[in-house]
Image: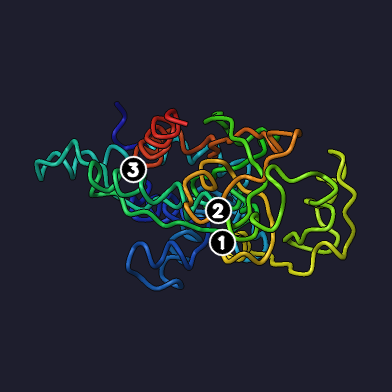
Amino acid sequence: MDWKSITFDWNRARAFLVTAEEGSLAAAARSMGMTQPTLGRQVAALESEIGFDLFTRRGRGLELTPNGIKLLEHVRLMGDAANQFSLSASGKSDVIEGDVSITASELLSTFMLPRMIKTLREVEPGIDIEIYSSNEIRDLNRREADIAIRSVRPTQPELIAKKLCSVRGHLYAAKNYLRQLSDPPSIAELNKANFIDTEKPGRLMTLLNSKGFNLTRKNFPVISNSHIVQWELVKQGAAISATLEEIGDNEPLVERVVTSNLPLITMDIWLVTHNEFRTNRRIRRVFDFLVSEFSDY
């Protein structure tokens, strides 16, 4: 090996690696426990040393340039080697540590993820989890999350996806609400009932009308952009709405609204991450763990 050819500053390379992983100078500086200007100078010094830009600014974050993407693979290997050296020296070479962020819908974050995360923390106490509970899709390319659980398969070539399971949804109502209707209720009765959706008119009305209902905006006197709020309103007997059977069937206060058009919804659940994270041990560990946990559904 030509040792004289190795002239770069590892601190600068590490600053580049952490900035690429975290997606912004501010986040990288917090992760490394230094000020943002100091970290920015290290990245700028590396760019000056190698003679090309590593990042371009995109919104509040940073995006790797083509040259930055090429170098990142090599710097990741260096980072892994440095981490393994440190772990081996301290007798912790098998320990996986660090932060992993997961984004999922409100319903999945509330009713399905907590049990899984509890188990994950028991088997991997060195991994800290941050959950973004939102029905909005976070941009993995911008590092807004490490892992996403979605109901739509991504089309971006930079993302890798694994189908976790298929889930079904039904209409549910509180038992005291259903007592006002026949058993099972007819479509004609349900056309006079109250429903909850995210907006007026919303997707639920469109979906139900496509299945033989004849609902109008008057059937939706209550709306909420939060699926958790919707579900609480259903449990209180305010109206009817739809949710996943894994959630609805396990709630003793409600029952399925049985019609001839069941299931109401069928959709696939996908686990998604950026393809660059295949070499990140902690993200890969969480990804594989979630695949295993969802295999029970």
User: Nearer the observer, disc 3 or disc 2?
Assistant: 2
For the residue marked with disc 1, what is the amino acid?
Lys
Mark 1 or 2, nearer chain start: 1
- The front one of 149 and 277 is 149
Q: Residue at x 66, y 34 (%)?
A: 267
Left or right relative to 222: residue 3: left
Mark 3 or 2, nearer chain start: 3
Disc marking residue 235: 1
User: Nearer the observer, disc 3 or disc 1?
Assistant: 1
Secondary element at image label 2: strand
Q: What distance separates the C-alpha of mark 1 from that of mark 2?
A: 6 Å
The quadrant in which residue 78 appears is: top left
Are the residues tagged 3 and 2 within 8 Å (C-beta)? no
Secondary element at image label 3: helix
Q: Residue at x 39, y 51 (%)?
A: 114
Are the residues tagged 1 and 2 within 8 Å (C-beta)? yes
Instruction: Note whether 40 is above or below 283 in the view shown.
Output: below
Q: Quadrant of the N terminus?
A: top left
Secondary element at image label 1: helix
Disc marking residue 37: none
For the residue marked with disc 3, what is the amino acid?
Gly
For the residue marked with disc 2, what is the amino acid?
Val
Instruction: Note whether 197 is above or below 155 in the view shown.
Output: below
From the top left corner, tell me how far across and down residue 91 is, in percent.
9, 41
Left or right relative to 214: residue 231: left
Identify the residue under disc 2. 254
Identify the residue under disc 3. 79
From the top left corner, tell me how far across and down residue 22 is, in percent.
47, 55
- The front one of 166 and 133 is 166
Q: Residue at x 83, y 58 (%)?
A: 192
Q: What distance separates the C-alpha of mark 3 from that of mark 1?
A: 51 Å
Left or right relative to 141: residue 82: left
